Amino acid sequence: MQKDLPGLSKKSFSMFFGGGEIWFEHLDGIYEHTDLAIEKLESDSKLFKRPSGTSLIAINLDETEANTDLINAISDKLLNSGKRFTRVVFVGTYKAVQRELKRVLMGGGFALKFINDFEKAKEWLVSEEFYG
């Protein structure tokens, strides 16, 4: 059953780390089930786009097919949610997906980075370095 996918059981959450607060959006482990990944993103976005929430977000796409529909849904949530993000890092992406994400998110008003090591991604989000 699709609802038993490992990525659907992972909860996205906010956590304090290194003096800052980070939202961890877990879209990993959903494989080719784009509709379920978009559904999870839609549900989670109600939490991460709150004005009182953090402006730092890590989006994990490891073992999830990031096709055009999912990339567009992510872009919509980051650019059109009414929330201003300052830093966004993607974990678990490969070059073709990175190029497409850069294309759709360019000019979004936030620093953008692709780091496939979750610890390094967290450190970058809270670091003094601001340039992607």
Image (tube, rainbow, N blue to C red):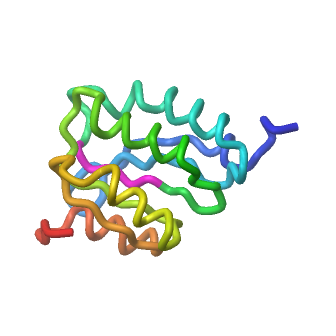
Image quarter of the C terminus: bottom left
**Overall secondary structure of the magenta section:** strand
x and y percentages locating residue 32 in the rendered image? 72, 50
Nearest the camera: 29 or 70? 70
At horizontal 29% and vertical 28% (from top left) the residue drawn is 81
Residue 2 against residue 97 in the figure, above or below: above
At horizontal 48% and vertical 32% (from top left) the residue drawn is 44
Residue 77 sits inside the magenta stretch: no
> Toward which corner of the image does residue 77 lie, by quadrant?
top left
Please state the total of marks drawn on the protein image.
0
At horizontal 22% and vertical 62% (from top left) the residue drawn is 126
At horizontal 26% and vertical 50% (from top left) the residue drawn is 56
Given the current orientation, which residue lies at the most extreme right position? 1
Q: Is residue 57 left or right of residue 37?
A: left
Residue 57 sits inside the magenta stretch: yes
> Toward which corner of the image does residue 103 lie, by quadrant?
bottom left
Nearest the camera: 40 or 54? 40
Residue 24 against residue 132 in the figure, above or below: above
Image quarter of the N terminus: top right
x and y percentages locating residue 5 in the rendered image? 76, 45
x and y percentages locating residue 30 in the rendered image? 68, 49
x and y percentages locating residue 60 in the rendered image? 50, 56
Q: Is residue 35 left or right of residue 104?
A: right
Q: Is residue 38 left or right of residue 5?
A: left
Which stretch did the figure color magenta?
55-59
